[in-house]
Each structure stands twice: as structure tokens, then as C-alpha cells.
Amino acid sequence: MSDTDHAITHTLGSALPPDFTQLTSADLTELDAMLNNVLSQREAALRAAVETSISHAPKLMRPTIRRALGL
């Protein structure tokens, strides 16, 4: 797999910075795994924060708030 079509370009959503051409394919794969792990952790933390915030609203308003937030 070349550096231009490596999975990390999909994860980043853009082309790799020029300095990344010095990394091996194994390094890029490891970096992609670490990045995906961090993104998953961030998503879980954000989801927990939203649920905690919504829990402060009156119970009858929670479905409406979720719909307004697109959840």
C-alpha cells in the first residue's frame, strides 16, 4: 500500500503532510490505529458528557432535547 492510499489518509480526511513520507507503512498503520483509538475515546467522552447534561433536564423534555440535538 502506498503512502498516498494508506488508511490514515481516510482517517484524517486529507492527504498526509509531506514529512509523513519518511514513515514506513508499519509506522503509518500504527499511527492510524492510535488515531482511531483516540477518536473513539473522544466520541465516548462526548457522548457521556451529553447524556450527563441531558440528565439535568426535566424527564419529559429529554426526548425533545435529543431530537433537537440530532441524537
Image (cartoon, rainbow, N blue to C red):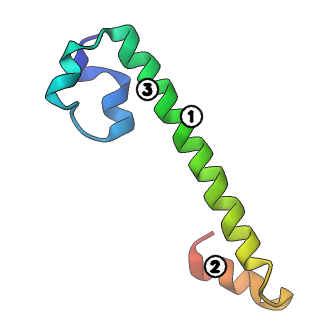
Q: Which mark is residue 12?
A: none
At mark 2, the secondary structure is helix
Amino acid found under the numbered disc labelled 1:
Asn
Which percent across, then down, holds residue 60? Answer: 83, 90
Amino acid found under the numbered disc labelled 2:
Arg
- In the rendered image, the quadrant that contains the C terminus is bottom right
- Image check: 18 left or right of 16? left
Q: Is residue 14 above or below residue 49?
A: above
Sequence order check, earlier mark of 3 and 1:
3
Q: Residue at x 73, y 78 (%)?
A: 54
> Which one is closest to the eye, mark 3 or mark 2?
3
- Category of crowding for the residue at label 1, using alpha-carbon neighbours closer than 10 angstroms: few (below 14), some (14–19), many (at least 20): few
Amino acid found under the numbered disc labelled 3:
Asp
Sequence order check, earlier mark of 1 and 2:
1
Q: Which mark is residue 37?
A: 1
Q: Residue at x 34, y 39 (%)?
A: 12
The residue tagged 2 is 67
Q: Is residue 37 above or below residue 52?
A: above
In front: 15, or 27?
Answer: 27
The residue tagged 3 is 32
Q: Quadrant of residue 7?
A: top left
Which percent across, then down, holds residue 49? Answer: 68, 66
Which percent across, then down, holds residue 59? Answer: 85, 86
CA distance for labels 3 and 2: 33 Å
- Category of crowding for the residue at label 3, using alpha-carbon neighbours closer than 10 angstroms: few (below 14), some (14–19), many (at least 20): some
At mark 3, the secondary structure is helix
